[in-house]
Image: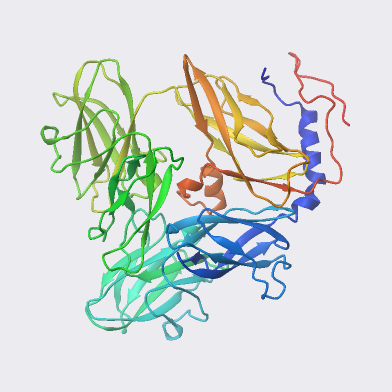
Amino acid sequence: MHRLSRPAPSFVCVCLTLIAFSDRSWAQIPSIGATLPQGAAPGQTVDVKIRGGGLAGPTQFWSSFPAEATLPTEIAGNGTNAGEITYRLKLPADAPPGVHGLRVATAKGISNLKLFVVDDLPAVAQTKPSATVATAQALTLPVAVDGYVDNLARDYYKFQVAAGQRVAIEVLARRLGSPLDSTIRLLDAKGRELAYNDDAPGLGSDSMISHTFKDAGEYVLEVRDIRYQGGGNFLYRLRIGDFPCVTVPYPMGIQRGVSAAVAFAGATAQDVAPMPLNVAGDASVDWLPVGAKLPGGKSSGFAVLSVGGTPEAVEAEPNNEPAKATRVPLGASLNGRIDQPRDVDCYTMTAKAGQRFVFTGVTRSQGSPSNLFLRLLKSDGAEVAAAEGVGPSEGVINYTFPADGDYTLEVSEQTGFGGPEFAYRIAVTPHEEKFELSASADTLNIPLGGLAMVTVAAVRGSFGGPIELSLLDPPPGITATPVVIGPGLTSTVMTIQSDASVAPGKIYPVRIAGKSQAGNVAGQAIATVTAAQKTAFSGLSVPPQFLSRNIAVGVNPAPFFTLKTDKPEVVFGKDLSATVKIV
């Protein structure tokens, strides 16, 4: 039986004492501050310097992309320097391009997650000084440059182009967890501004330009922080090539086990050939990084595709009014695009009395700049429900159909904007008494034979019952004390233990699952770590979705001594007091 209780003050003090006396081993836990380069190319081998602290004695390299990782022995002292190690990474030719993550482990624990790019552009390192046009770093296109901006400074680069050549330029900074809020300016040889961008639609605070040059010659690019801030941690990867400027795939989602042709949405994505895809019906993947190339192109634009278990419908234009609406089955997710300012898309579906469905907008969380306004209409045009994307919400309608008949969902952009990059997806699902969970950390280092704690919060919606938490498929030796988020409560602390059999120096991915019982229907949710990653990555608005559910667990050395109570569980009476023995 699970018991719900409020921790007594003495229990809090014991936890604080344990943490304080474990401090010595925690100080040696590995951490990653930067990598050089910040990316690796599919089908190639590259030496990656990992800089940070506590890196001596590496025992494991982990990445979300496929790679063979070895420690080059010809590098003097490699693996013994606490501040830097070098891994040689060999990527297969089919490694998916885009933003990924990596970690390292030592016998003292596991590192934080560091974002890293799989990029098919050849890479070079920044050379300084490059703070003036006169000292601009010369580049040969196509290229990716790994650099950083100094405080109150600009970085300049120069390159040659042919007449009529189209060049795409983008900065990956916030998308890599950097605090840099980039802005870029393209200048001709006389210093005249040809193009400028601060925040590109769908890229958060990162910048992107696509420019076709009328004349051949040398041109200059300026990179800086919009606030003129900078420093060694204001890192960026500058990409210059022939890649299409994409925001999201189109459609934005596909169904497992069903073949689909996936195109892309973006300012210059119209010429990208649709990509045939079929994700196996039994695949556990929910998100799939995909790359987009123009015909004959050498470099890729990045996007992430949603993978689910329900049908996906795509709008058929013209569908700007209910009379011309795209007819779809109720329960299919809807994919469309606000092609031009003030565009409206309509979808008609047949419902039965008493059916309750939820229409959830998916835009910014997947990289689209769209900010949706949704209206649900009866067959006579009368509005029965409406929603708009406000704050973190991207627009949600939860509606019970009162009568049999046709209903139309009207989708528009509430700002009035539009264009080829303004794609959207509406997830259409039957209403369930469900909930969402989030965990307070994506990395846990547990003392050998000890424990670590993580706060699990619940967003309940309409569900108010108890939620039972557990570890999903934990490795041998890693366990969690069963705990319940009580009825009406929104958070609890979960304790995860390591016994003495767990091998240190390894990275163990775990997930936290929550189960509920609503009537005769059992529900389950997997805790995300998105909020923790946003904090770790300098306020990154949308961390990579496929990294959002795994918590990395490592084991570090046992503390000098431990304190524990003589009882594993304390049940409090009405006076909220209990007597325990500390041993």
Q: Which quadrant would residue 429 be assigned to in this image?
A: top left
Looking at the image, residue 521 sits to the left or right of residue 481; the answer is: left
Looking at the image, residue 428 sits to the left or right of residue 12; the answer is: left
Q: Nearer the viewer, residue 259 or 402?
A: 259
Q: Which quadrant would residue 292 be assigned to in this image?
A: bottom left
Q: What residue lies at 59% left-to-right and 62% top-to-bottom?
A: 69
Q: Position of residue 39 (x, y in %)?
A: 49, 65
Q: What residue lies at 62% left-to-right and 24% top-to-bottom?
A: 484
Q: Position of residue 354 (x, y in %)?
A: 29, 15
Q: Position of residue 262 (x, y in %)?
A: 29, 50
Image quadrant where one finds the N terminus = top right
Q: Is residue 574 above or below residue 221?
A: above
Image quadrant where one finds the C terminus = top right
Looking at the image, residue 481 sits to the left or right of residue 305; the answer is: right
Seen as rendered, the residue at the extreme left is 323
Q: Is residue 141 above or below residue 507?
A: below
Examine the rendering and report whether any part of residue 229 can be seen.
no
Q: Position of residue 212 (x, y in %)?
A: 25, 72
Q: Is residue 569 above or below residue 116?
A: above
Q: Which quadrant would residue 314 be assigned to in this image?
A: top left
- How many numbered marks, from 0 up? 0
Q: Nearer the viewer, residue 78 or 67?
A: 67
Examine the rendering and report whether any part of residue 314 can be seen.
yes
